[in-house]
Amino acid sequence: MAGLLPQALRSVHAQTLPAAEVVVVDDGSTDGTWAVIEEAMADHPGLVRGIRQENRGACAARNAGLRACSGEWVQFLDADDELF
């Protein structure tokens, strides 16, 4: 998913209504996903937050991300999704 994540994040940043926060959960990947998340955090300090956890599955990853969110509204997006 590391190869797909940058485009998913670009699609978030390209929205006409800017995101208040972007929480990205690395659910035990071994393909360099965490490096992509670190780069996104460096490029967008204060906006992008990363969570790294052992592999527990999609539901656990979403729950971890949801717990880290502070906004009233949440949208889930997987690495292979894009917003238009």
Image (spheres, rainbow, N blue to C red):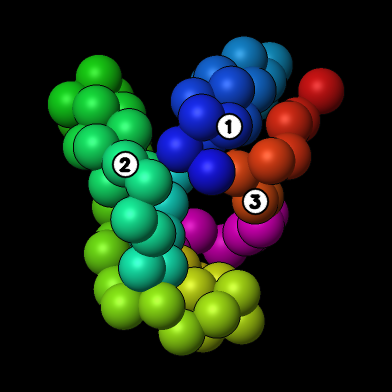
17 relative to 13 in the view: left or right: right
Mark 3 is surrounded, within 10 Å at the Cα level, by few (under 14), some (14 to 19) or many (20 or more) other residues, namely some
Q: Residue lying farthest right?
A: 84
* Magenta-drawn segment: 69-76
- Which of the two labelled residues, at mark 3 and mark 2, occupies the earlier sequence position? 2
Mark 2 is surrounded, within 10 Å at the Cα level, by few (under 14), some (14 to 19) or many (20 or more) other residues, namely few
Mark 3 to mark 2 CA distance (whole Å): 16 Å
71 relative to 33 in the view: left or right: right
Q: Name the spot of residue 58 as percent of width and height, x first.
A: 60, 74
* Element type at mark 1: loop
67 relative to 44 in the view: left or right: right
**Which residue is denoted by mark 3 in the rendering?**
78
Mark 1 to mark 3 CA distance (whole Å): 9 Å
Q: Nearer the viewer, residue 55 or 19?
A: 55
Nearer the camera: disc 3 or disc 2: 2
Q: Which mark is residue 32?
A: 2
**Which residue is denoted by mark 1 in the rendering?**
4
**Residue at 66 percent of width and 50 percent of height:** 77
